[in-house]
Amino acid sequence: MLLEKNQEIDRIFTIARRHSLIDLEALETAVRIAALAAGATVLEQFLALVGVGRQKTPLRCSCGTQMKSRGLRTKRILTLLGWINFKRSMYRCPTCGIIRYPGDEELDIVNTSRSPGVRRQTARLAAKQTFQEASIDLEQLAGIIICRKAVERVAEQEGERMETWMAAERRQWCSQDPPEPYLVRPVETLYIELDGTGIPMVKREVQDRKGKQPDGTAKTREAKVGCVFTQSKLDEEGKPVRDPASTTFVGAIETANQFGKRLFAEAVRRGLYQAKRVVVLGDGAEWVKNTAQTHFGYAQFIIDYYHASEHIGELCCALFDRNQKYVETYRERWTDYLWEGNIEAIMEQATQWLPHNPKTKKDARTQVNYFEKNKDYMRYRDYREQKLFIGSGVVEAACKHLVGCRFKQSGMEWTVNGANAMLALRCVVLSNRMQEYWEQRAVA
């Protein structure tokens, strides 16, 4: 590989001298190749000091037996500078035969030929685009050649490690004595939003599951998504403004109870106990309300205004069927009532218009009951006077961006494990926690 690079550099310089031409792109490419090759040589020489020699303390196997050195073994490592050779000591357990390479453990390259730097760049690109596109960009931008399938393996492995890291964090934040979170500024209002969206699955992941297909089968599994952000200022019109770069994300395909614990831990990490006000925003789905009541019972729960507005439209259609004039008249009137938080007026008038047709009457009664159950979470005039958000647009955007843009492209189908690994990876990247994760790995 080094010989090929040197030959390419010589070829470019020869052509430039022969024709007295300056091709800046070719020259900068040649110099970059030379610099990377030189850097790889230096890195290889530096690592020659790592992973060899007698251990300061006896190396013991998990079975308790002291392991014995069996000489040096060479490993090829793909780094950000290119391929290098790494010689390190191999230790074998005389009792159970387990093999360990302390040098690999020190450099975080156990069971992999890719350096942490390469894995980090691979994971970041794969989090933002398809595995094939990430493979192409790695080669074009960094000169690192990794096939599409290898990119997928690296990204999912790092995603699984990130999930393990975050799970350990959750146990810490949910303990009886959680640590004090680091806060840049006091939290005026902490918002917690949650929603769900489907991810297309391979057939075995949806087998025997009920779904929304015409035949009752399912093609997707619901990924539950949550976001936490802060608000401390108002705009010139007196409306609440989300604090810049304050949004962090969580997401997974899991039960509502598991997700509730995940979201609660993230809220604690973000300053739940230090916030002056806590607001939970979501639609009226039962799992959303149950999560809010179970984990954030002391918070102000608000049903997304725009979701409630859709129910106004459904109520009008159920009541007035084909009479479009009445549908439009009452939709406008009751939307005004909704804006003012006057839910009782909507229910009272709607009850007077209940149709005689059993089917439409049942549909209309369902919508009236929806407002009856949720009226205490729809006092939008009061919320506006308190300078609070009344829409869950942040988490709805997260469903489209965090999930939709990466998981719902044409032809994509996922396993639950693969989707959860990539969800963990995307949450870390979009929450700007990538540096924190790798720093934790370096000192682990």
Image (cartoon, helix red, strand yellow):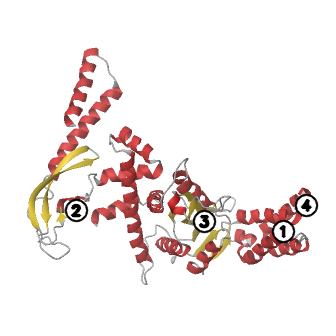
**Residue matched to label 1:** 359
Place residue 284 in its image quadrant. Answer: bottom right
Q: Is residue 256 left or right of residue 236?
A: left
Residue ID at (48%, 57%): 430
| Residue under pointer 4 | 326
How packed mark 2 is, by other alpha carbons closer than 10 Å (few <14, some 14-19, many 20 or more), is few
Secondary structure of the residue carrying tag 4 is helix
The type of residue carrying mark 2 is Glu
Tags 3 and 4 in contact by the CB under 8 Å rule? no
Mark nearest the camera among 3 and 1 is: 1
The residue pinned by badge 2 equals 105
Residue 315: x, y in percent?
81, 66
Please say if 66 is above or below 100: below
The residue that label 3 is drawn on is: 195
Q: Earlier in the sequence, mark 2 or mark 1?
A: 2
CB under 8 Å between callouts 3 and 1?
no
Q: Nearer the viewer, residue 7 or 215?
A: 215
